[in-house]
Amino acid sequence: MRRTHAVILLLAIACSRATPAGPVADPVADRPALRAADSAWNQSSLAKVPDRMAEHYAPNAVADFGAEPVRGRPAIREMWAQSYADTTYRTDWAMERAEIVPGTLLGYTIGRWRQHSATSDATGTYVAVWQKQQDGRWLVLLDTGRPDHPAVAVR
C-alpha cells in the first residue's frame, strides 16, 4: 500500500510545475494549515453537504477509489451528493501524517478512513495530494483511498 501512495505522490509532483512562479509552500510553517485543511475536509464529510464537500477540491481534482476516476469539482460534488442521498452513509477519517513537498506548492495527507451505510462497513487508507492556492488555501488535487478488505455486510 505504501508503494501505491508513493507512486501517486510522485505522479502528482511530476505533473506539477517543477518551479512554481512566486513563493513556494514552507515545509514547516505551512504544515499546520495543511493539517487544518484536512480536518475541515473531514468535518465537511460528516456534515454531508455536497457543496461544502466540493469546496475542498481544486477545479481539476481527481477522486480515484479504484473504479473509474471522477474528474473535476462538479463531478466530485455529484459523487458526494449520490453518497449522501443514503441517509445512513457516513465517511470519516483520521489523518496520520501531513507533509509539504519542498520547493513546490504541493503537500499530502495520509491516514485511515471508515465508511458506514445500512448495508456495509469498510475501513482503509487514504492519500490526498493538496495544492496551496494563491490565497493561501489548500485544495485537494487527488483524493484516493483503498479498503483494507472488501466491505463487510451489516446485519
Image: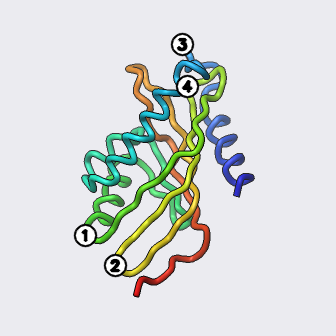
Residue that label 4 marks:
105
In the rendered view of the protein, which quadrant contains the N terminus? bottom right
Residue assigned mark 2: 118
Where does label 1 land, which residue? 87
Q: Nearer the viewer, residue 72 or 92?
A: 92
Residue 81: where, in percent of width, then height?
28, 60
Q: Is residue 35 above or below residue 116?
A: above
Element at label 1: loop
Looking at the rendered structure, the kind of residue marked 3 is Pro
Q: CA distance from mark 1 to mark 2?
A: 9 Å
State the image coordinates of residue 125 (x, y, percent, origin top left): 58, 57
Instruction: Identify residue type, mark 4.
Output: Leu
Q: Position of residue 94 (x, y in %)?
A: 50, 50
Identify residue type, mark 2.
Answer: Ala
Bin the neighbour count of mark 2 within 10 Å (Cα to Cα): few under 14, some 14-19, many 20 and up: few
Q: Between disc 3 and disc 1, whose residue precedes?
A: 3
How far is disc 2 from disc 3 in space, using C-alphas? Answer: 47 Å
